[in-house]
């Protein structure tokens, strides 16, 4: 009998690299537990906003943030580049990592969730937003191989 390793996609958007640090920690734990993990970053390419997010810290912090506020409050979407890993492939578990902008999903992740690439998937992952993550429980068809990350 051939045992396949659980396939996990960690899809994320990050500006300050904090989300990436969480994704890398999750990937390390999942790999230790026998999972095949792929990390894929969504790029924010919308010409109206991409320049302000091309450097850290923001060049004109107050103006750049206020310039995003109207679009964020109306839950607008923007242009993004969806990595091939998110468009193709079969996964047992898909985790989406993202910062929270003004108490809601950031524009790049919202754009992905409304994209054709997300719609083509048989099931969309559940979305949870929290300020402090203390424990994440992973479940999948390979539940014996996925456990709680603390």
Image (tube, helix red, strand yellow):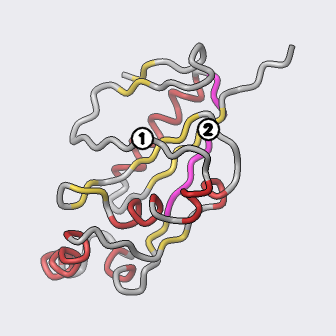
Residue 27: image x %, image y %?
Answer: 52, 36
Helix, strand or loop for disc 1: loop
Question: Where 140 falls versus 51 (above or below)?
Answer: above
Q: Main secondary structure of the magenta part?
A: strand
Residue 40 falls within the magenta-colored stretch? yes
Q: Which residue shows up at 23% across the image and 36% down it?
A: 132
What residue does disc 1 label? Answer: 126
Q: Which mark is residue 24?
A: none
Q: Residue pushed farthest right?
A: 1
Looking at this view, is 47 or 18 the one in front?
47
Quadrant location of the N terminus?
top right
Q: Residues within 10 Å of mark 2 (few under 14, many from 20)?
A: many
Q: Which residue shows up at 66% across the image and 60% down it?
A: 84
The answer to which quarter of the image holds residue 37 is: top right
Q: Residues within 10 Å of mark 1 (few under 14, many from 20)?
A: few
Residue 133: image x %, image y %?
Answer: 28, 33
Looking at this view, is 86 or 125 the one in front?
125
What residue does disc 2 label? Answer: 37
Q: CA distance from mark 2 to mark 1?
A: 19 Å
Q: Which residue shows up at 37% across the image and 55% down it?
A: 17
Looking at this view, is 24 or 10 the one in front?
10
Residues drawn in magenta: 34-42
Quadrant location of the C terminus?
top left
Q: Which residue shows up at 64% across the image and 39% down it?
A: 91
Question: Where 56 falls versus 5 (above or below)?
Answer: below
Residue 15 falls within the magenta-colored stretch? no
Residue 19: image x %, image y %?
Answer: 37, 49
Q: Is residue 146 left or right of residue 90?
A: left
Badge nearest the viewer, 2 or 1: 1
Going from N to C along the chain, the mark reached first, 2 or 1, is 2
């Amino acid at each position: 009998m051939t045992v396949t390793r659980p396939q996990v996609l960690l899809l994320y958007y990050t500006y300050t690299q904090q989300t990436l640090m969480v994704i890398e920690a999750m990937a390390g734990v999942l790999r230790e537990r026998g999972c095949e993990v792929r990390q894929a970053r969504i790029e924010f390419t919308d010409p109206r906003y991409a320049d302000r997010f091309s450097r850290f810290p923001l060049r004109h912090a107050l103006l750049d943030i206020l310039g995003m506020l109207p679009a964020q409050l109306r839950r607008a979407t923007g242009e993004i580049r969806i990595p091939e890993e998110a468009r193709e492939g079969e996964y047992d578990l898909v985790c989406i990592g993202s910062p929270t902008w003004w108490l809601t999903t950031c524009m790049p992740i919202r754009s992905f969730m409304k994209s054709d690439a997300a719609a083509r998937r048989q099931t969309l992952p559940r979305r949870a937003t929290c300020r402090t993550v203390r424990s994440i429980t992973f479940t999948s068809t390979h539940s014996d191989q996925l456990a709680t990350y603390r």
